[in-house]
Image (cartoon, rainbow, N blue to C red):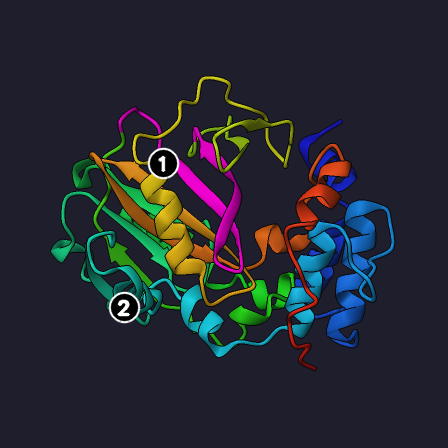
Amino acid sequence: MDSVLKKVVNHPEKIVYGLERKGLLDWLSEKEYIKITYRLAFGRKLNLDDPKALTEKINWYKLYYRDPLMRKCVDKYEVRQYVRESIGDAYLNECFGVWNSIEEIDYNALPNQFVLKPTNGSGDIVICKNKSHFNWEEAKRTLTKYSKRSFATKTKEWAYYDVPFRIIGERLIKSSDENQIKDYKFFCFNGEPEFLFVASERGTEHLKFDFFDKKWNRLPITNAHEHNMTLNKPQYFNEMLEIARKLSKPFPHVRVDLYEEENKVFFGELTFYHFGGFTKFEPDEWDYKLGEYFDLKSIQKKH
């Protein structure tokens, strides 16, 4: 089975993404699009009347919760002000520029090492470790590809609607190993981190996701990627928990992404809709167990 067919079999919802990208599903309402995509991804009907699974509740969240602060917080540049006001500057990585287009970037003025990423994206990143061996033309093509992605249309993530594409430049955080820095992603509910996963071996074909509770006990969950059994509890884990509490306080649910490198903690990003609510937690029972943390009863439903 070739790689394309394998992707279709394992992720049939990507068929919908492709049709949406071509504008062939514009006639569908937001709710109907989400219901169809969910059915393809999970093989079951999306319960929006009484959601139980975490993925169901994330999709309910997309449709019915509207807080303008969320739009500020998904913007990789604007969120810096929110972080500054909430926990101060100490956890922010150095930012050396924000541009409205690729053409505005003066490559010669960039430092020898840097990171570039869209302000309205998630996970899209261009890394330069040494300008002497860096292909700027290829990087521009990659950024152009990123500029055409839209979480608002692909997975109907409300907070990304009307967030403009810009490019933010940041200092390259030095990793303690040869791989990209590890991501510690805390799932928070009403200001309390309840569990997390660690993304390790990023930038390779062997990306790993490992889930833990807030006491660093490993959870038997698979979520799209295999496991890294060599992970150790981060040195500043308790500090990370406190940062996650402060940054998540205004929201019924948000994922707070942090890094631990260079003997300190760095802020990464805030994510409101983990994988758009369209990626399985396996075994499936964990989708429902994790969903128990997300209490929708106190949320005022917006139409």
Determine the secondary structure under disc 1. Answer: helix
Q: In the picture provided, is 172 more to the left or to the right than 22? A: left
- Tell me which amino acid carries mark 1: Phe
> Is residue 145 visible from the viewing direction of this image?
no
The front one of 155 and 209 is 209
Mark 2 neighbour density, 10 Å: few (under 14) some (14–19) many (20 or more): few
Q: Position of residue 294 (x, y in %)?
A: 64, 56
Eyeballing the image, is 89 above or below 180? below
| Secondary structure beneath label 2 | helix
The answer to whether residue 31 is visible is yes
Magenta part, dominant SS: strand
- Examine the structure image and report whether residue 199 is included in the region drawn in magenta: yes
Q: Nearer the viewer, residue 35 or 246?
A: 246
User: Which quadrant of the rendered structure holds the C terminus?
Assistant: bottom right
Front residue (pair 133, 71): 71
Asked if labels 1 and 2 touch by Cβ distance under 8 angstroms, the answer is no
Q: Which residues are magenta?
A: 176-201
Q: Position of residue 181 (x, y in %)?
A: 34, 35
Residue at (51%, 65%) from the top-left corner? 251
- Residue 196 lies in the magenta stretch: yes
Closer to the chain start, of discs 2 and 1, is: 2
Which residue is disc 1 drawn over?
237
Horizontal placement of 68 versus 60: left or right?
left
Residue visible at 21% across and 63% down in the picture:
97
Residue farthest top in this picture: 230
For disc 2, the marked residue is 85
* Cα–Cα gap, marks 2 and 1: 22 Å
Residue at 32% x, 51% y is 267
Give residue 193's position: percent from left, percent from top: 49, 48
281 vs 201, left or right, is right
